[in-house]
């Protein structure tokens, strides 16, 4: 071979699978049937068309028997031939295409050469691109995760504003992300809050109560009243629809829970005293 010439290494071919595994379920069943007949190999040869040496190979798994021999052995044993014939058919199925069979012998598997793996170094241009992309991602996450002092996420741009938000729920329009609690009133079993979103220019009522309590949550400003009813079957629903408002002044939040009514305009507490 010339120096520097490419050399092709071909792995050895796997050995062919034996006709039947000596310790497989099919061969074991054959042996059990033979024991049940109580016949010797010579007696089996005398009562079937197959020789003594043939039966020896069948029962040792050295040769696959024909189906007629399997059926004859089962009938001599007084057994139903269907189960053992099913094993015989399954043992005859070839392995899936592209998957070599090794007959259950791990030593027959080919040994593939272990090629050394050399790490590749990325060029400086690729490393610089990765650094830039990571920096942009961090900047976007930081910009999108700004929070108000109350801990709510601040939306970069609300999905609606003013009159276009009227009647929508605050979480659907993302107006709740910069919501400010303007007043609150508490009952023994629940609390009602008046919430206001400066970015959306809307106000709404929220109630904190157990999920099983039936509730009607409403917000009003003058003659404008919007409300939402929740049956108390464990379903979510803690807010009224939003009311367009240039400021929270003159807006009242109410909730009727299990027949009891509480409104922030009737007995309100400043937000700092909650």
Image (spheres, rainbow, N blue to C red):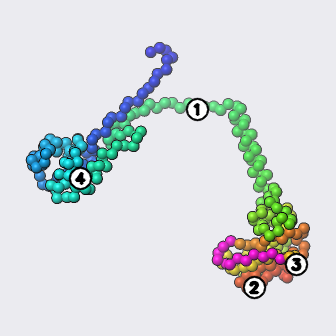
Residue mark closest to the camera, 1 vs 2: 2
Q: CA distance from mark 4 to mark 1?
A: 54 Å
Identify the residue at image location x=77%, y=62%.
Answer: 174
Q: Nearer the viewer, residue 48 or 234?
A: 48
As drawn, the label of residue 223 is: 3
Which picture quadrant has residue 108?
Answer: top left
Q: Residue furthest bottom?
A: 259
Determine the secondary structure under disc 3: loop
Residue 198 is inside the magenta segment: no
Residue mark closest to the camera, 4 vs 1: 4
**Above or below: residue 179 compared with residue 229:** above
Q: Which residue is mark 2?
A: 260
Q: CA distance from mark 3 to mark 1?
A: 74 Å
Q: CA distance from mark 3 to mark 2?
A: 22 Å
Q: Earlier in the sequence, mark 1 or mark 2?
A: 1
Which picture quadrant has residue 111?
Answer: top left
**Above or below: residue 37 compared with residue 209:** above
- For label 4, the crowd category at 10 Å Cα-Cα, with few meaning under 14, some 14 to 19 and many 20 or more, is some
């Amino acid at each position: 071979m010339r120096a520097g010439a490419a050399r092709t290494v071909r792995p050895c071919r796997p050995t062919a699978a034996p006709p039947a595994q000596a310790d497989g379920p099919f061969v074991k069943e054959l042996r059990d049937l033979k024991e049940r007949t109580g016949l010797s190999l010579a007696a089996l040869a005398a009562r079937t068309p197959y020789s003594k040496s043939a039966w020896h190979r069948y029962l040792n798994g050295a040769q696959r028997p024909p189906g007629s021999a399997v059926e004859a052995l089962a009938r001599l044993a007084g057994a139903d031939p269907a189960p053992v014939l099913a094993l015989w058919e399954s043992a005859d199925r070839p392995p899936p295409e592209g998957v070599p069979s090794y007959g259950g012998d791990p030593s027959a598997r080919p040994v593939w050469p272990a090629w050394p793996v050399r790490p590749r170094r990325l060029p400086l241009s690729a490393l610089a691109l990765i650094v830039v992309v990571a920096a942009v991602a961090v900047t976007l996450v930081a910009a999108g995760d700004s929070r108000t002092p109350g801990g709510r996420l601040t939306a970069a741009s609300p999905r609606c504003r003013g009159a276009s938000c009227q009647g929508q729920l605050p979480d659907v329009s993302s107006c709740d992300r910069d919501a400010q609690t303007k007043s609150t009133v508490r009952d023994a079993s629940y609390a009602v809050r008046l919430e206001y979103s400066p970015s959306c220019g809307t106000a709404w009522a929220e109630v904190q109560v157990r999920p099983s309590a039936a509730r009607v949550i409403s917000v009003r400003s003058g003659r404008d009243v919007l409300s939402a009813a929740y049956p108390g079957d464990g379903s979510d629903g803690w807010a009224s629809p939003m009311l367009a408002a240039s400021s929270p002044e003159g807006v009242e939040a109410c909730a009727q829970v299990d027949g009891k009514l509480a409104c922030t305009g009737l007995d309100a507490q400043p937000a700092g005293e909650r």
